[in-house]
Image: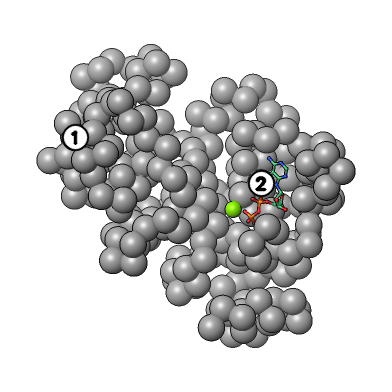
Amino acid sequence: MTILSLEHVTKKYGDFTVFNDLDLKINEGEVTLIIGPSGSGKSTLLRCLNRLEDIDEGEITFHDAPIKSETHLRENVGMVFQSYELFPHLNVLDNMTLSPRIVQKRSRKEAEQEALSLLERVGLKDKAKSFPHELSGGQRQRVAIVRSLCMHPEVLLFDEVTASLDPEMVKEVLDVILDLADEGKTMVIVTHEMAFARAVADRIIFIDGGRVVEEGHPEDFFTHPKTERAQQFLQNLT
Ligand code: ADP
Ligand code: MG
């Protein structure tokens, strides 16, 4: 089943076309990895998927229907960023329960119970009352991930969530994402961690120059990239 679909999507910033006539389907239970050079439009693509960015042409559908409202879409498509985006003045628990209470009108008690069990799952239950500045980068990013889970999104988008972490913290964050993949969560992930990409992906989408250059199974993509552009990209990584 397709949850999100991009059809003939064109996105421009002024005169600059980021991508042109792009088609992409995000299927239920699949982990899709978006890979491509810096500046190829990976972040823009994720932002279009939950309509943080408008598109210029084409259509994005959610469950095969035009998007009814941006609020409805954003409730169902969660996003985690490189820079955590936690509210600095709220403690961890309040960061996690704010949207469930305000947007979904859930009770504080129920929202907090769920938040605490998610924190326990990622080993951070004792940090519930801590403020973001009291946490390490890896801890903040784990909070950002479970915060997005509190809204029960159907799809989770991850934009280079380990890019600003010290190397020793990368694994603790990637392990959380691997765990979500094992659970069958639908995710779209942008990352430079190629070993992780290979391990977690059901499908690799390689984008460059405003289009999908290559798409395939991770083993095929990493061992026998079909296009010269993908071959070059993979060679330059090592
Ligand atoms: P990636 O995430 O793959 O590095 P981005 O999606 O951030 O790429 O950017 C794609 C291209 O669009 C880049 O050339 C970037 O400079 C440009 N771009 C990104 N955001 C904006 C913006 N808000 N205004 C103008 N150009 C932008
Ligand atoms: Mg980016």
Pointers 2 and 1 in contact (C-beta within 8 Å): no
Image coordinates for residue 140, horizontal then vertical, percent: 31, 45
10 Å neighbourhood of mark 1: few (<14), some, or many (≥20)?
some
Give the secondary structure at mark 2.
helix
| Residue at x 62% of width, y 41% of height | 47
Question: What residue is disc 1 on?
Answer: 130
Toward which corner of the image does residue 232 lie, by quadrant? Answer: bottom right
| Residue at x 41% of width, y 19% of height | 104
Q: From this viewpoint, is residue 179 visible?
A: no
| Residue at x 68% of width, y 28% of height | 67
Image coordinates for residue 152, horizontal then vertical, percent: 41, 34
* Sooner in the amino-acid sequence: mark 2 or mark 1: 2
Indicate if the residue with disc 2 has its beta carbon within 8 Å of ligand 1: yes
| Residue at x 19% of width, y 49% of height | 123
Left or right, residue 81 beside residue 231: left
Figure coloring: one colour
Task: Identify which amino acid the numbered label 2 is placed on.
Answer: Thr
Left or right, residue 20 beside residue 160: right
Of the numbered discs in the image, which one, if any, rests on residue 44? 2
* Residue that protrudes farthest toward the right in the picture: 15
